[in-house]
Amino acid sequence: MIQLGVDIMKNTVLTFKQAKEKGEKLSMLTSYDYSTAKLVDEAGVNSILVGDSLGNVILGYEDTISVTMEDMIHHSAAVARGAKNALVVCDMPFMSYQTSVYDAVVNAGRLMKEGRAGAVKLEGGKEVCPQIKAIVAAGIPVCAHLGLTPQSINAFGGFKVQGKTEAAAKKLLEDAKAVEEAGAFAVVLECVPSKLAELITKELSIPTIGIGAGNVCDGQVLVYQDMLGMFSDFTPKFVKKFADIGSIMREAFAAYDKEVKAGTFPSKEHEFTISEEIIEKLY
């Protein structure tokens, strides 16, 4: 059990590499604000992903495509202020890197400089390797993302497991090797058959972080609202609820609402006092 308040080693790109070499598993969770990031950090989680999933779970967008650079910078900076030991990885939003290598480097730089991220994450394989190379050359660590890449959901025709045919599996493996060659320090594998994820993990010298890719990956990532039962619009198959915080929150909100309307909150213990003599002088 982790003791809160004790010093935990600062996680960096180097510690990710060392974990892979030692066969140690890496943990990653999303966060989008200061207070949650602080709790995740204190729990000892290796990395915090400021995901463009904030479009769904924080901003109420229908997809991640609507997320802007300003959204990501705003939330990344808040997370960075709360994370002391976890490596903060910030998603590059849709069309912030696909347009050109120049745009990719400029926007990655903004996420680091204004968003205070420790690394950026972008979706895609061979087609984005020029961007990965240029961003890494600028001194910015890059985490790649393969498999089900939500920003390409329209091209996929929905949320579907990727790499199930021979051709698709071969392309995923080739893309994984390509992003490693381009300089990515890790790669997220989303909605990939576990056997394929296992092969990719064995073939790469950089860590694989799975989400719906089985337990053979070097690490795992989940959206924290999913694993705490706080987001009910849809629940992916790969999500395990580690606690039902959503129900606890609803019950607490309902109890508050009831007491306020009944006039029982606040009670005397929540009030501040003033001398009766002062009050009398006001009449």
Image: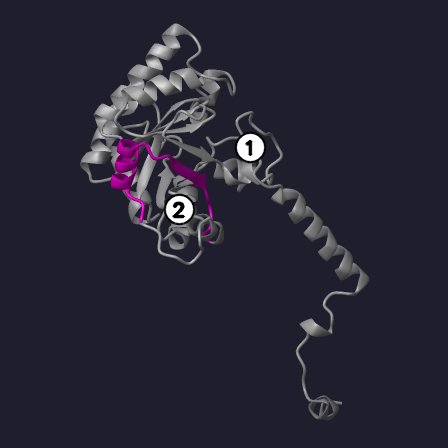
Q: Is residue 60 visible?
A: no
From the viewer's side, name the closer residue of 42 and 119.
42
Given the image, on which type of amino acid does mark 1 rest?
Answer: Lys
Residue 151, percent from left and from top: 43, 27
Q: Residues within 10 Å of mark 2 (few under 14, many from 20)?
A: many
Instruction: Establish if 250 lies above or below 257.
Output: above
Give the residues drawn in magenta, as a range: 10-34
Quadrant location of the C terminus in the rendered image: bottom right
Q: Is residue 133 visible?
A: yes
Q: Is residue 225 magenta?
A: no
Q: Earlier in the sequence, mark 1 or mark 2?
A: 2
Q: Residue at left 74%, top 54%?
A: 255
Residue 15, percent from left and from top: 28, 41
Residue 272, percent from left and from top: 66, 78
Q: Which mark is residue 76?
A: 2
Q: Is residue 20 magenta?
A: yes
Q: Which mark is residue 87?
A: none
Given the image, on which type of amino acid does mark 2 rest?
Answer: Ser
Instruction: Establish if 56 lies above or below 38.
Output: above
- Label 1 sits on residue: 240
Q: Report whether 215 appears left or right of 126.
A: right
